[in-house]
Amino acid sequence: MVEGSPLKAEETKKKRMAQGKAMGIEALLRWGTEIGICDFTPSLIPPSPSFSCLGYSLFASHFPDAGGRGLGAARDLKKGELVLRVPRTALLTSDSVVRDEKIACCIKRYPHLSSTQILAVCLLAEVGKGKSSKWYPYLLQLPQYYSTLANFTDYEIKSFQLEDAIWVAEKAVKKAKSDWEEVITLMKEMQLKPQLLTLKSWLWASATVSSRTLHIPWDNAGCLCPVGDLFNYAAPDDEAIDNFNLRLMDGGYEEDTASYCFYARKKYEQGEQVLLGYGTYTNLELLEHYGFLLHNNPNEKVFIQLDTAIFRVSTWPNDSLYIQQDGIPSFALLCCLRLWATPVNRRRVIGHLIHSGNLVSVENEVMIMNWLMKNCDKILGKIPTTIEIDDELLILLDKFLNNSTCLKLVDSLSSKVEIREFFQAHGLEHEAVTWSELPVRVQKSLERWKLAVRWRLIYKKTLLRCINHCKDRICELSSQRGLLREMDQT
């Protein structure tokens, strides 16, 4: 590697940024100690002099394959054990910010604003205070940008390819802009700095509120929880969902200690990343609210177009009629299709059996499987790119994002058209382009574009799994029918 090359400069820049973040984390944890954040139960663990609020139960680290910066187990942790306590005085909430009389006076004149809009405004107000803000060490550690749907450009939204996903993304963009237009007058009255009045700043603040707030009983907008929001996400398992009323969120605000308390969702070994379940979300919902998705998401749902006749016989909510990520139709969808495939004059007689999950007949089940195969295949046929092309594109983007390749050889790839369109959308040519040569705005756009491609690939693979599941089910039913015939003949 040549000294002074762009790649060398980029690596040096990354090292300095990493060092800066590490120093910032240390400052945050020192501040956390001063304000009362701790990872032990004060009544049980004798306090020892420390410059960090972590170290007994948790430690901050980077987990490159599981969400990036997060919290790991500093020792073996038991399921249900308290691992972090954040006092109310440390929480950044609307009511804690509006203790500033000037801010409170301005906000009172806008009662029509939502609680989330108010919290986003309060966040920008604290950012504007700079070092004089009580939460300054925390604010420094917040991400500089987010990949939530409201930040997607027209090209990135188009890359989802599916109409439903495009509609959700466009709606998120319009909502964010509308919210900003409603609060801009208020922010001007509060005399926020000009750079904090822009749509870009608003998108950052609203994404921070959307992706990092935790539930509190006194404010629908929730709270920003220093140190507590370092936990990365884990989808709730079946046990957590079954015990929803106990502790789905792995923690909550507790009045008796006036603090937000976090508990180990399972048994953790020392060094293992400790995760937090925010709730049950599909990948599109994770993108909308948090700016990431999961490759294997047990809560993923693929909805396909159902005929009016099918909806007419259904007694199930529409959002329960979906295909799971493993390709198996949901219980409600299977029941609904079985009832639809049953002759009208027999539906009332056997409806209760269908809703109990019983098979109607081999013929009925084969009809359903064929219907699902046909419709999944029809959807796949209408989507502009295939699973193979998307796989190829993601492999290339992964290499590109890791600075291990450039895009000068894409002409030999099936995905060359889409790659060329991406760079043309940004007024660039892709020949001999490397990651370090791209403007920052294009780097961020490329990361969001990759998320859109990943989402649509997961969608397509789910449809393909459904087709394969239906084929296997038909073969299984055909074998059973053959055995029954042999038994009848004997």
Image (spheres, rainbow, N blue to C red):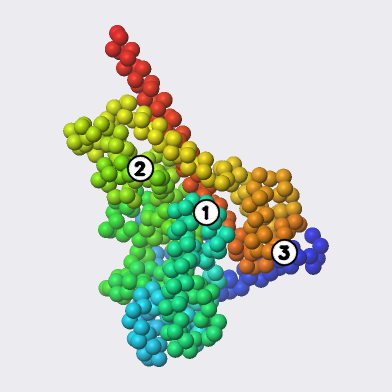
Sequence-wise first label, 3 or 1: 1
Residue 220 percent across, percent down from the top left: 33, 71
Please give the name of the residue rendered at 29% of the width and 56% of the height, measured from the top-left corner: 244
Q: Which residue lies furthest to the top in this view?
A: 490
Residue highlighted by disc 2: 307
Label 1 element class? loop
Q: Is 405 left or right of 338, judged from the image as shown?
A: right
Q: Is 263 left or right of 400, judged from the image as shown?
A: left
Above or below, 176 against 157 in this view is below
| Front: mark 3 or 2 | 2
Residue highlighted by disc 1: 160
Q: Is 382 left or right of 42, judged from the image as shown?
A: right
Q: Quadrant of residue 322?
A: top left
Which amino acid type is shown beneath numbered disc 2?
A: Asp
Q: Residues within 10 Å of mark 1 (few under 14, many from 20)?
A: many
Instruction: State if disc 1 and disc 3 touch (CB < 8 Å).
Output: no
Q: Residues within 10 Å of mark 3 (few under 14, many from 20)?
A: some
Label disc, if present, on residue 437 of the rendered structure: 3
Above or below, 211 against 355 in this view is below
Please give the name of the residue rendered at 43% of the width and 80% of the height, measured from the top-left corner: 183
Above or below, 415 against 363 in this view is below
Please give the name of the residue rendered at 37% of the width and 55% of the height, measured from the top-left corner: 280
